[in-house]
Image: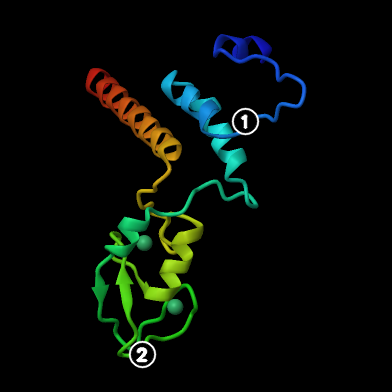
Amino acid sequence: MADYFSELGFRPLGEGEVPDHGAHLLRLLRDSGNYDLLEMFVRLRNDDGGNSAPAASEKVVQELPLVQPLPKEQCSVCLKNYDEDDPCRMMPCKHKFHQNCIFTWLKQTNSCPICRKELPTDDPDYEAIKKHKEREDERKQQLESLHNSMFS
Ligand SMILES: [Zn+2]
Ligand SMILES: [Zn+2]
């Protein structure tokens, strides 16, 4: 581990220095493509009882479309039926919730309470990791389909 850090340009802390858990380290990891380590640090930083996802992007949340709920339907966050004039918002996955319920929820985490589909966040580290994983998945799928086309 020590070599890893010195490779990245780290030096031991001097007397009275406080470790910088912030942007510097994460940016280095991001720039150098150390996604596994980056993910670990982001997880540590965001650690609040096992939930490693940051809040959803404020802008994206504000732009969720307002919808008219059916009175028979139930909000999955507060488990109450909708009143006709309750302001409700719809997620991109088409799940609906009380505006207050989903806004509060999305300040804690970026995914739908029902199906876990994620919204974008304002966290560049989290987004970098997510993109990296999507690329890996894509590559895996390409390999699989290549494999299938060769062997079936
Ligand atoms: Zn609710
Ligand atoms: Zn959903």
Q: Are marks 2 and 1 in contact (CB under 8 Å)?
A: no
**Which kind of residue does numbered mark 2 sit on?**
Asp
Residue of label 1: 20
Give how far across and how far down residue 93 sits, in percent.
30, 60
- Residue at 28% of width from left, 64% of height from top? 64
- Where disc 1 sits, the SS reads loop
Q: Is residue 118 above or below residue 15?
A: below
Q: Is residue 110 above or below residue 152?
A: below
Query: Between marks 2 and 1, how big is the CA–CA gap?
Result: 49 Å
Q: Nearer the viewer, mark 2 or mark 1?
A: 1
Lateral position of residue 21 relative to residue 123, left or right: right
Using the rendered view, name the quadrant where residue 58 is placed. Answer: bottom left
- Where disc 2 sits, the SS reads loop
- Residue at 37% of width from left, 86% of height from top? 82
**Which kind of residue does numbered mark 1 sit on?**
Asp
Q: Please name whichever residue, 96 or 127, is drawn nearer the observer in this view of the structure.
A: 127
- Residue at 27% of width from left, 19% of height from top? 151
Q: Is residue 117 above or below residue 145?
A: below
Using the rendered view, name the quadrant where residue 99 is placed. Answer: bottom left
Quadrant for the C terminus in the image:
top left
Residue of label 2: 83
Give how far across and how far down residue 138 sits, in percent.
30, 30
Give how far across and how far down residue 100 sits, in percent.
42, 75
Crowdedness near tag 1: few (<14), some (14–19) or many (≥20) residues, C-alpha within 10 Å: few
